[in-house]
Image: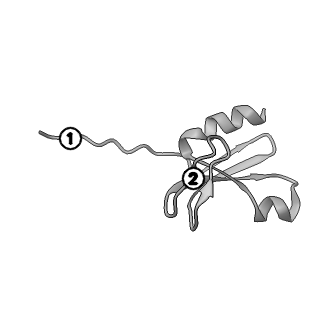
Amino acid sequence: MVMIIQRISYPKEVNWDRHTATLRTTRKEHLCAVCKQPIPFGEKAYEIVLWGAGLAGKKFPDYAHPDHLKEYVEACT
C-alpha cells in the first residue's frame, strides 16, 4: 500500500487590522489563545502581536495553532 502525504503550507506572516501573526517554531510550551490546548515544544505556531501594545505586547504575545488562526482573526474583527 502506498500512502500519499500532503504537506500543508502556511504563510510565514499574516497582517490584519492592528495585528501581525508570524509563524514560528516554539521554544517552550504555550497555550493556544483559541482552543486553550497546549502547543508543545518544537511545534509550529503563530505568534500574534498587537500593534501599539508596547513592550508587553512584544514580550507576551498570544500564540495560536496554525489551524486556529482564522478563528482568532474572526474573533478580533
- Circle 2 or circle 1, nearest the eye: 2
In the structure shown, which secondary structural element does the residue marked by tag 1 occupy?
loop
Tag 2 residue = 38
Q: Amino acid at mark 2?
A: Pro
- The residue closer to the viewer here, 25 or 12, is 25
Mark identifier at residue 43: none
Q: Residues within 10 Å of mark 1 (few under 14, many from 20)?
A: few
Q: CA distance from mark 2 to mark 1?
A: 29 Å
Mark identifier at residue 3: 1
Q: Residue at x 59, y 39 (%)?
A: 68
Q: Is residue 47 above or below residue 42?
A: above
Q: Is residue 59 above or below residue 15?
A: below
Q: Is residue 58 above or below residue 33?
A: below
Q: Is residue 73 left or right of residue 77?
A: left
- The residue closer to the viewer here, 58 or 36, is 36
Provide residue 1's location: percent of width, then percent of height: 11, 39
Colour scheme of the rendered structure: one colour
Q: Residue at x 52, y 63 (%)?
A: 41
Instruction: Give residue 66's quadrant in the image.
Output: top right
Q: Residue at x 58, y 62 (%)?
A: 29
